[in-house]
Image (spheres, grey):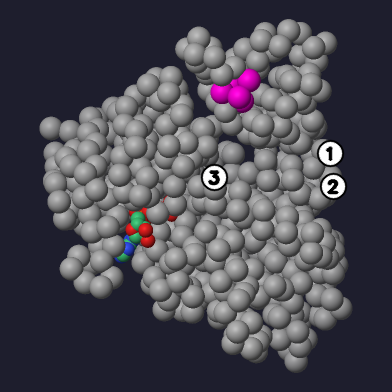
Amino acid sequence: MIELSGVSFSYGSPADGPVVLSGIDFALAPGECVAVLGANGSGKSTLVRLCDGLLTPDEGSVLVDGVDTRDGERVWDVRSRVALVMQNPDNQIVGTSVEEDCAFGPENLGLPRDEIRRRVDEALAAVGLAGMERREPHLLSEGQKQRLAIAGALAMRPAYVLLDEPTAMLDPDGRAAVLAAVDGLRATGHGVLHVTHQVADAATADRVLVLAEGGTAYLGTPEGLLGDPDRLARCGLELPPAGVLASELRARGFAVPITAMDAASIVETLCR
Amino acid sequence: MPLTAAHAGLVYSPGTAFSQAALEDVSLSVEPGELALVVGRTGSGKSTLLRLLAGLVAPTSGSVHTDGLAAMVFQDPESQLFAETLLEDAAFGPRNLGRSDAEARAAAADALAAVGLDPAAFGGRSPFTLSGGEARRAAIAGVLAMRPAYLLLDEPTAGLDPSGRRAVREAIGRARTTAGIVLVTHDAEEFLGDADLVLMLETGRTVFSGTREALLAEPGAFEVAGLRPPEVLRAQMLALPSASAKASYTLDPREAAALLAESRGDAG
Ligand SMILES: Nc1ncnc2c1ncn2[C@@H]1O[C@H](COP(=O)(O)OP(=O)(O)OP(=O)(O)O)[C@@H](O)[C@H]1O
Ligand SMILES: Nc1ncnc2c1ncn2[C@@H]1O[C@H](COP(=O)(O)OP(=O)(O)OP(=O)(O)O)[C@@H](O)[C@H]1O
Ligand SMILES: [Mg+2]
Ligand SMILES: [Mg+2]
């Protein structure tokens, strides 16, 4: 469990910096995926950095499987349990080849060579980078870099994976691959935090957290948010066009589920 | 003469062991007032095409011509921000083009406001401590402030919240009254309605080039490019596949709901 209790944080000194997050109570359990939404600057990336110990709270505490992220002697216990995929993949490239970059995390875990090889091959295949092992990471396209960053996290097989807008620059296949990987992680007992601006991503999560003005604007089921237009608007969010299509069809008496945001599931209910 | 790429090709590090073909025989022409949308899978050559149009790299075959400044907003906004404050950053471009200090700062403040970054709150901030979406907005402001003849935008709304998307789309609309726009996106749905031209790339080659109307009439092109049509369009393709229905395909979700409901009879 990653547990945030009464967490406040500001980037300046606590006295004068604007407070980015204040009084946040939130927990991510193994085996669940929580989507995190909110306006630009609402503190999503800050929250993610607090969860992996890159930042520590000014007030309150963050515990990762019981370990306080402020405990300097147990930094490694936190780092080996949590993998973070940063919003900007350029900030995360460490290797001089794709395979070397992907192996960085597993190598730090001290795994045997053949196990590292297996994990790297599997992770690169999962994100569609098989065949690019020898390419130079900094010469990849942005979407390829994003896929590589995700592969690096998958290869660590950590208890918790924090994905900061992992699909912002991916094509539809890439998005589907990442969402499938998220499902796989969740099914095998990993906890996933998925920061996104896509309301459709919230539809497939177990729970949704919306940040606004330093606090929690919503924490609950996807249906409770997506099925409530006023709440959605108060959170500064909008349905994607497919969500508008679905709600128009509901208004016409078709039983399209609240979380149906893709053509196939919308049309499927029409045919019933 | 418009901004034109004629049979342009690009091979990175040609003649070396790392040689990488990124574009082959791609042609595109944009006039002031026009918006061309460029879509394609990861690695298909979209950013490479923008770099060619911006003159940042020279084509290794074919040619690129422009009659005015073609300025680019990079896909990674952080690689574009450099000054001490956001206001200085956005003023750099216009100042470099010979505008007076006062003019440059005014243009910078206007551009920051246009992308939803209040100059009073953000003008004095360092560009290096911004959130991802704030950084993208700042990078766009820096290029808008230059008022280029051609605006080359690489994923301008990736990572933006709904109000940011709206602000950027409106700013693009205003710029378009005088400038030509080439816009790369993974979210074709968002900009298809604004596009005069659509270019689809797949591993560096053109798989579709034509008007928005031509694309709507032949949405199978998305699949040829390895993409998915916008969900609203896909719903119509799945539910109303007949050739006669194709003519009325729409991107508007409300119109699409009416079409779909009509075809199934009223459920309620
Ligand atoms: N290193 C820093 N120093 C000072 N302020 C910062 C720093 N990093 C972020 N901020 C500010 O803190 C606030 C929260 O930033 P954060 O990156 O967490 O937002 P976000 O919700 O991830 O936004 P986005 O959707 O744009 O990625 C923003 O207003 C940002 O400008
Ligand atoms: N400087 C470079 N040297 C070598 N190869 C490169 C370089 N830049 C890009 N490439 C390769 O050229 C191809 C096209 O890259 P480009 O960045 O144009 O793709 P893109 O369509 O913009 O992709 P994305 O959607 O991921 O941003 C990719 O295979 C990429 O790995
Ligand atoms: Mg962020
Ligand atoms: Mg690109």
The residue carrying mark 3 is A172
Q: Position of residue A20 (x, y in %)?
A: 68, 61
Check disc 1 and give the amino acid type: Gly
Q: Position of residue A252 (x, y in %)?
A: 76, 14
Q: Is residue B170 visible?
A: no
Is residue B131 inside the magenta stretch?
no
Is residue B238 inside the magenta stretch?
yes
Check disc 3 and give the amino acid type: Pro
Quick one: B20 or A20, which is closer to the camera? Answer: B20
Quick one: A248 or B27, which is closer to the camera? Answer: B27
The residue carrying mark 1 is A224
- Identify whether B159 is placed above or below A54: above
Q: Are marks 2 and 1 in contact (CB under 8 Å)?
A: yes
Please give the range of residues in magenta. B235-239
Q: Residues within 10 Å of mark 2 (few under 14, many from 20)?
A: few
Left or right of A194 in this view: B148: left
- For the residues labelled 2 and 3, the Cα–Cα distance comes to 27 Å
- Identify whether B138 is placed above or below B215: below
Left or right of B167 in this view: B205: left
Q: Residues within 10 Å of mark 1 (few under 14, many from 20)?
A: some
Q: Are marks 3 and 1 in contact (CB under 8 Å)?
A: no
